[in-house]
Amino acid sequence: MSSPLQTDLYQLTMAAAYFEAGKADQESVFHLFFRRLPFKGGYAIAAGLGPALEWLRDFRFATEEIDYLSSLRTKNGHTLFKDAFLEYLGNLRLALDIDAIPEGNAVFSHEPLLRVQGPILHAQLAETALLNIINFQTLIATKAARICHAAGDADFLEFGYRRAQGPDGGLSASRAAWIGGCAATSHVLAGKMFGIPVRGTHAHSWVMSFDEEQEAFDAYANAMPDNSTLLVDTYDTLTGVKCAIQTAQRLRARGHELSGIRLDSGDLAYLSIEARKMLDAAGFPKVSIVASNDLDEHLIESLHHQGAKIDVWGVGTNLVTAADQPALGGVYKLAALLRDDGSWQPRVKLSEQRAKSFIPGRLQVRRFLHEGEMIGDAIYDIDHPFPQEITLVDPDEPLRRKSIPADTPFIDLLQPVMKYGKLLDEIEAPTIARKRCKEKLKQLDSSTLRLANPHRYPAGMELTLHEQREQLINTHQTSTYGSEKNQ
């Protein structure tokens, strides 16, 4: 479902106030970004742009939605929204320009994933939905990329729908996990909608519904002779492997091959090593060993270090819920307003916590490359010329800087995708974003990809933008301090 009511009430009350104040059409720029990389990692993977653009494209207030808003009352019983504003909403079509980093790109703290430009009322009404979509899918795509890195040459499957945060959360998680690198999903609707391969085995209940484990395996293989991965840990895992081998022998006699066995409990390293020995000795070296059971990237990495013989990893709960960090914390901030003379006035938020201030202006991200490897990102203001001498300044630690040689090859990451509310091209399929993710991660140094204590990739403000930001902050602080002093 796509509805303009997928928002916070304060977006609508602000919109009503903009309308009442005659500011509805004031041209503005907002940026969507996050301040901290998730999972204590070295990068994030941008995701969610496709569904976000669909929501913006389809933005309409239906009659029943206007009727609902007209029914809302204040504490003293008055209508919350005036009729003139509700009539305005009924005719509203978002007239926004969107520049975005394409899905699947590696991204970093403070970099705008989206630049939203247009009438301030329109941009305000887009905030909540954009954050909801981009935050979650970027988080899950990043988690999936980390799991993919830990899995190495082995495939990993997304098995999480039953543990996801509701039907929509499960569907979004499957889409984002595919972008991040999973090889397949157990979620059939996600397979249909997004072109993701679907995979599955069977549950313990199948085995328990028979008197004998061997009978259960044989019956399943009879029903699915070319798609049988047998769950072997219902009673005793290694006994289950023996039964699976007998089923594999019967399948082979009929011209079919057992696809795999699945381990879902116990010491996965030990059991996989023993199972591999048994399968190889019986003449089934190509039967895959699939492992599940509350896996994440850290456990997968540990099992690799223990010499586990696992060919496929099934990851569910810890992926689709991002259990160790269930929210990205992305924000959406006003960064500039258009003056009457046609120039842009940068805006900045001050706070008791300096870390919660942000970068003003109309921003772009320039990524520099050396021999195909990413070496640094510069956040800069498109309304100021980019300098020949390039210095990156960390927004959180201004003394942390990096110089980039002049004439270094670069690409600008934010690309126009919507103009005045109209899509400029067809929305990309998640498969394209998945391919991009794999390509971009290959451009990162291995020290940035590692799971623990990754190298900090140099992404920061271009020096003149940093100086402009500091000047703007100091001007506001001086003004505020002077006002307090005179009270």
Image (spheres, rainbow, N blue to C red):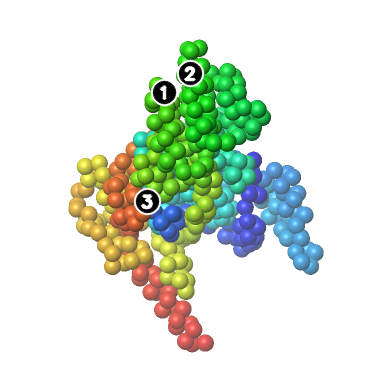
* Pair 1/3: label in front: 1
Disc number placed over residue 249 in the picture, else none: 2
In screen coordinates, is 124 left or right of 77? left
Mark 2 lies on a secondary structure that is helix
Mark 3, Cα crowd under 10 Å, few <14 / some 14-19 / many 20+, is some
Q: Where does label 1 land, which residue?
A: 282
Query: In which quadrant of the rendered view does residue 84 lie?
Result: bottom right
Q: Would you say the residues marked 2 and 1 are in contact, meaning their CB atoms lie under 8 Å apart?
A: yes
Disc number placed over residue 451 in the picture, else none: 3
Residue 232 screen position, x and y as percent: 53, 32
Amino acid type shown at disc 3: Leu
Mark 1 lies on a secondary structure that is loop
Residue 202 screen position, x and y as percent: 58, 30
Q: Relative to residue 318, is residue 478 depicted above or below?
A: below
Q: Residue furthest right?
A: 77
Residue 146 screen position, x and y as percent: 41, 46
Q: Residue at x 33, y 66 (%)?
A: 397
